Amino acid sequence: MTLNLFDKQVYIDRRNILKQTIGHDGIILLMGNDDSSMSYKDNCYPFRQDSTFLYYFGLDIPALAAIIDTGTGEDVIFGDELSLDDIVWTGTLPSVNEMASLVGVSQTNPGGQIIHFVHKAITAGRRVHILPPYRAENKIKLATWLNTGLNDVSDHVSLKLIKAVINQRIIKSPLEVAEMEKAVSISVEMQLAVIKHTKPGIKEYELVAKALETAAAANCRLGYPAIITTHGQTLHTHYYGNTLQEGRMVLCDIGAENAMHYGGDLTRTFPVGHSFTSRQKELYEVVLNAMDHAISMLKPGVRYKDIHLAACKKLAEGLKQVNLMKGDPAEAVEAGAHTMFFQCGLGHMLGMDTHDMEDLGEQYVGYTDTLKKDTVFGLKSLRLGRELDNGFVVTVEPGIYIIPELIDRWEAERKYSDFINYDILNTYRDFGGIRIEDNFLITDAGSHLLGKYLPKTLKDIEGLKN
């Protein structure tokens, strides 16, 4: 088995920065993930290591945990060696100590001994810094190690550690950017394979197969379940049983995750047949104009919330031109009327996680102490609002989604009737949805498009189908 790692000094430096940030303030306990059974004990879901554990320790192996002692400066990895029965079924691996040495750690101990290290720290009155667990098995372990109830584990989560990790991981190093360039470029190849295979009469799952084939051929997997659908108004649908029909569109939202676990996140919307209908072209241009305007605003110091709202205004202006909206576009956005068509946020952070570090708390990743997340419809789904900084990687993904159930609810309430032309909107009930998404690195000069260029103009998209 080959371990995919950066140079050991990368991990040493990362841990040293974390120690300096936390100070001589106890121990840091970082959890790796375990194998998780899918249908019976030995039939497991594909293993995915915890991203923060990967960031500081790099080892993509189940059933590991680590302690960083901010007082002594020691780093310790805990894990059990393979038994003979393990080797029979899985083959050999380097020892835990050999793997630890590859990431600059000299001290290892059997997995069961971690409880003694934790209890020793607690007895000495030292703080045990943990991150919020998102897997049940890790929550159970932490409850045992910390000698507390399952419902009380959250009381032990360290906000100081959360903020330290986010502040470190949020700025992507050149090594990380290089990995993301690779992942996004493979995501581009996945999109092209899906677009070129699309034709009337086939099933959505045949397009999913093309995405999986392209990812696997590049030694990648999907960073999240594919969204490939002719019902693009459903934001996160994972049903793939619809038959593609002439005159409909396919919304394809996919991203490759490479061997180093950095990923891409791209969306394109394209016709099932050779060309868009006139209505589809009109609304596609509205989305594309909003996207281009948002991209032009990307630079350090600009709040992403303001970019989101500017994109919403562009959407409202375009929707007014096609008579789906009326009145003043700025007033419509201020009132929230645009959320009939754009119910979600413009984008999010991207890195080792598709929604990078959101397991640590969206309010800390996408927002700050002085900028709190909104709770109103639309803005409550904006995962990123804070000021951009050099080294951030973000998605930009405006869309238009025609949701019949939302039309019925709001029309009955006469909600936003000063801004929405319900009579005309009702003739779009079977329209579906359009989303266009690219990934950007924020730079001193503004922004840099990650990965190979993926066509997005109407002409270029239709050109791929002909």
Image (cartoon, rainbow, N blue to C red):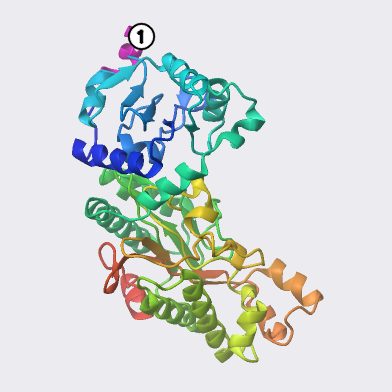
Residue 457: give x, y in percent of width and height.
36, 78
**Is residue 87 found inside the magenta-colored segment of the image?**
yes
**Which secondary structure is most common in the magenta stretch?**
helix
Q: 438 or 98: which is nearer to us?
A: 98
The quadrant of the picture occupied by the C terminus is bottom left
- Residue 210 shows in this picture: no
Residue on which disc 1 sits: 85
Placement of 427 over or under 464, stated as above or below: below
Tell me if 204 is positioned left or right of 352 in this view: right
Q: Residue at x 56, y 55 (%)?
A: 237
Q: Residue at x 48, y 60 (%)?
A: 201
Tell me if 421 is positioned left or right of 414 in this view: left
The quadrant of the picture occupied by the N terminus is top left
- Residue 225 shows in this picture: yes
Disc 1 secondary structure class: helix
Residue 206: give x, y in percent of width and height.
43, 51
**Is residue 179 found inside the magenta-colored segment of the image?**
no
Determine crowd level at label 1: few under 14, some 14-19, many 20+ residues with C-alpha closer than 10 A: few
Q: Which residues are magenta?
A: 82-92
Residue 381: give x, y in percent of width and height.
58, 62
Tell me if 154 is positioned left or right of 75 in this view: right
Placement of 184 over or under 157, stated as above or below: below
Q: Residue at x 64, y 31 (%)?
A: 152
